[in-house]
Image: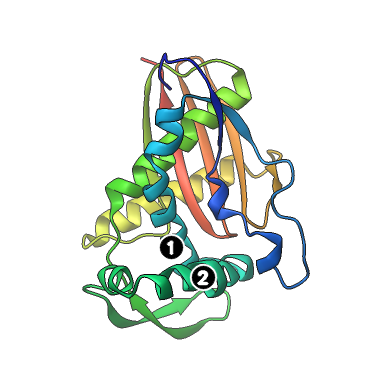
């Protein structure tokens, strides 16, 4: 959130995550009543590439729902077909793995892909700042920390700590109302205290991001 004059609006989260009607089998409108906040032109367009990277990552994640998968099979597939070179770069280092599905209690075949965490974090932080403004009508001046619950690190203890933090946040927010008019794509829960705030964001069903706002 900068101090430049607001000359446009920014979507939180990025509009590209929400399917266009032409790509939805039942023609449902997932772009109605999207959350927007005032923005300068520089910051609204500066992360457009990162927004697209987030779309590719989320829609390819094993944690996404049918809406996210459909985004991958339509919008993302078209983009990859237009740029085969780019398609090969995002698959660098990928390898087949087996993932245990807690819902079905079965192992599924999948691919492990290396993601650019710094780019994802930049978009999530930008989204968090925007949603804070949407909630409070004020710019957040402190620091923001984001933790992604749908990516894994090469440190098992870190993965366990992140999973525990996400579970604790879900338990805490269990009675909170989910916010967002298109929950199949995105919704969030938020609470603010005197010194800190916490937000839990959900993308395509089960891809979760935990946000901490620190005012000190």
The residue singled out by tag 2 in the image is 72
What residue sits right under mark 1 in the picture? 56
Residue shown at 55%/15% (left/top)?
A: 138
Residue 5 vertical placement versus 129 (above, below): above
For mark 1, give the secondary structure: helix
Q: Residue 122 got which mark? A: none
Left or right, 129 with respect to 155, comes to right
Residue 105 horizontal side relative to residue 27, left or right = left
Q: Which residue is located at x 50 percent, y 14 percent?
A: 194
Please name the residue shown 40% across and 19% down the image.
2
Q: Residues within 10 Å of mark 1 (few under 14, many from 20)?
A: many
Q: Position of residue 147 (x, y in %)?
A: 38, 45
| The one of 71 and 207 positioned closer to us in this rendering | 71
Q: Is residue 8 rendered to the left or right of residue 115?
A: right
Residue 141 in picture, x, y percent from top left: 41, 16
**Decide: marks 2, 1 in contact (CB < 8 A)?**
yes
Which of the 4 quarters of the picture holds residue 81?
bottom left
Number of numbered discs visible in the structure rendering: 2
């Amino acid at each position: 959130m900068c101090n430049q004059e607001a000359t446009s609006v920014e979507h939180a989260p990025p509009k590209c995550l929400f399917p266009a009607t032409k790509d939805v089998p039942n023609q449902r409108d997932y772009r109605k009543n999207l959350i927007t906040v005032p923005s300068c032109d520089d910051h609204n367009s500066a992360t457009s590439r990162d927004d697209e990277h987030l779309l590719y990552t989320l829609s390819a994640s094993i944690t996404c729902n049918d809406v996210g998968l459909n985004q991958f099979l339509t919008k993302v597939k078209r983009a990859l077909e237009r740029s085969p070179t780019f398609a090969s770069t995002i698959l660098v280092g990928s390898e087949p793995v087996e993932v245990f599905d807690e819902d079905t209690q079965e192992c599924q075949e999948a691919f492990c892909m290396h993601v650019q965490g710094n780019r994802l974090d930049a978009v999530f932080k930008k989204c968090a700042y925007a949603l804070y403004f949407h909630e409070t009508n004020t710019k957040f001046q402190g620091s923001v920390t984001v933790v992604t619950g749908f990516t894994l690190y090469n440190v098992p203890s870190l993965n366990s700590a992140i999973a525990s933090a996400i579970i604790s946040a879900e338990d805490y927010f269990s009675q909170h109302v989910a916010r967002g008019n298109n929950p199949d794509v995105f919704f969030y829960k938020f609470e603010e205290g005197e010194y800190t705030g916490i937000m839990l964001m959900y993308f395509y069903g089960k891809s979760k991001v935990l946000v901490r706002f620190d005012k000190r």
